[in-house]
């Protein structure tokens, strides 16, 4: 494991009181949207707690490859079956996924999750979250039925543990899976359960995210209730803004705009889309591409063909470097293709459809 400076994670702090002060300051900075300050403070302290905080700060800064390496090293060094080991597995899996290393993230998650359940180590909330993270990676690979089976099993485990956060995490992800499988009523029911469960836990970021997810599931299950869905999403945007949650904030703002476009109010969607695009985020983000595509749909509805075409090109430029198998990438290319058709560009539409097929893992005919 590569250690910052001359410290080793097992070295005792030189001044325990000062170390505790720095750790408390770093956690406060990280929770209040200042990951760079948090990282600097964590790196001044020795021990596993500081390295764990350093990994989370790196992740918040978008340095996912470094964060994945540090989480993996901390996972290797933690006791099998422990909460700490499961939490670092979650971090490593999540960061590997963000680095487009979905296959590697699934392998690690499967290895880590195999530690739990009879006759091995007892389940706990962190282990359930690890399973939920694996389900998310499987969803990204398009293995929706496998993800659903895993989430059903995890739901039984989480209900037995009785932890609201673990139970809510399972239902949150099961809602997304049900939505992708084309079951909007089930997705809406599960998102409502997740929202209620996170309301019992002291996890404001999770509560805000799930509120936004419940809003989008309500809009899809009951389009006539789009105003109620919009209220939920706008409240989620306000909460995520206060908490400094960039990626989820952009995604939620984009969903606000999409609901407005589909409700026949594209002019009201435009300010939300501009706000989402103005927020700092990864230049290769699929969420960013999605925002450009919703903007294209809004401009098309407003009769701005040139503006629509520019947004589609911006989305295609973000999507083009991606070559991995990924279900969201497939959906974004499919959406891009539909917009190219709307713009009267059949050749570009056909190329986008081919990219969508590749993103699902379809490499083409065996015989040429």
Image (tube, rainbow, N blue to C red):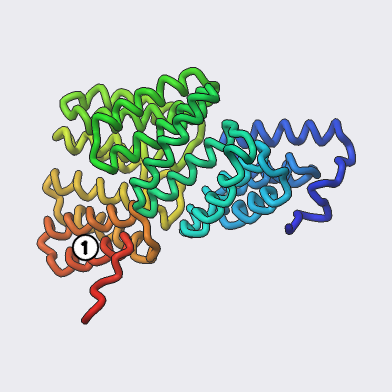
Q: Residue at x 57, y 38 (%)?
A: 117
| Rendered residue at 72%/45% (across/down) | 78
Q: Position of residue 104 (x, y in %)?
A: 52, 59
Horizontal side, residue 27 vs residue 346: left or right: right
- Classify 10 Å Cα crowding around label 1: few (below 14), some (14-19), many (20 and above): many
Q: Image quadrant for the N terminus?
A: bottom right
Q: Residue furthest top?
A: 200
Q: Is residue 233 above or below residue 70?
A: above
State the residue at coordinates (28%, 30%): 186
Number of marks in picture? 1
The answer, for residue 38, to whether it is visible in the render is no
When asked about the image quadrant of residue 325, the answer is bottom left
Question: Which element type, helix, strand or loop, lies under badge 1?
Answer: helix
Q: Nearer the viewer, residue 135 or 249?
A: 135
> Residue reaching furthest front?
119
Q: Nearer the viewer, residue 173 or 62?
A: 173
Residue depicted at 32% across the width and 61% down the height:
359
Q: Residue furthest bottom?
A: 368
| Mark 1 lies on residue | 353
Task: Tell which of 237 and 113 is nearer to you.
Answer: 113
Residue 315 position in % (x across, y down): 30, 57
**Residue 287 to residue 315: above or below:** above
Image coordinates for residue 154, horizontal then vertical, percent: 47, 35
């Amino acid at each position: 494991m590569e250690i910052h400076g001359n410290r080793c994670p097992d070295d005792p702090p030189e001044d325990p009181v000062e170390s505790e002060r720095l750790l408390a300051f770093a956690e406060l900075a990280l929770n209040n949207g200042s990951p760079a300050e948090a990282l600097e403070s964590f790196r001044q302290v020795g021990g596993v707690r500081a390295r764990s905080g350093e990994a989370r700060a790196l992740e918040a800064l978008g340095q996912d490859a470094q964060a994945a390496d540090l989480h993996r090293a901390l996972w290797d060094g933690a006791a099998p079956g422990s909460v700490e080991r499961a939490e670092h597995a979650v971090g490593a899996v999540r960061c590997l996924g963000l680095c487009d290393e979905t296959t590697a993230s699934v392998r690690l998650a499967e290895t880590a999750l195999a530690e739990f359940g009879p006759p091995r180590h007892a389940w706990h909330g962190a282990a359930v979250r690890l399973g939920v993270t694996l389900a998310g990676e499987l969803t990204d690979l398009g293995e929706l039925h496998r993800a659903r089976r895993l989430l059903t099993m995890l739901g039984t485990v989480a209900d037995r543990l009785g932890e609201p956060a673990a139970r809510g995490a399972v239902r949150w992800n099961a809602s997304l899976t049900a939505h992708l499988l084309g079951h909007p009523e089930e997705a809406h029911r599960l998102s409502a359960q997740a929202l209620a469960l996170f309301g019992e836990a002291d996890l404001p970021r999770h509560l805000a995210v799930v509120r936004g997810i419940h809003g989008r599931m309500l809009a899809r299950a009951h389009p006539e209730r789009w105003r109620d869905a919009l209220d939920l999403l706008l409240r989620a945007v306000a909460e995520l803004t206060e908490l400094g949650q960039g990626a989820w904030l952009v995604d939620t703002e984009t969903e606000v705009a999409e609901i407005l476009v589909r409700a026949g109010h594209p002019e009201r969607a435009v300010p939300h889309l501009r706000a989402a695009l103005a927020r700092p985020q990864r230049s290769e983000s699929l969420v960013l591409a999605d925002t450009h595509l919703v903007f294209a749909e809004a401009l098309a509805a407003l009769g701005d063909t040139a503006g629509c075409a520019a947004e589609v090109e911006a989305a295609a430029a973000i999507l083009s470097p991606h070559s991995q198998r990924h279900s969201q990438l497939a959906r974004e290319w499919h959406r891009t293709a539909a917009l190219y058709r709307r713009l009267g560009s059949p050749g570009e539409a056909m190329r986008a459809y081919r990219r969508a097929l590749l993103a699902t893992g379809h490499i083409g005919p065996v015989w040429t």
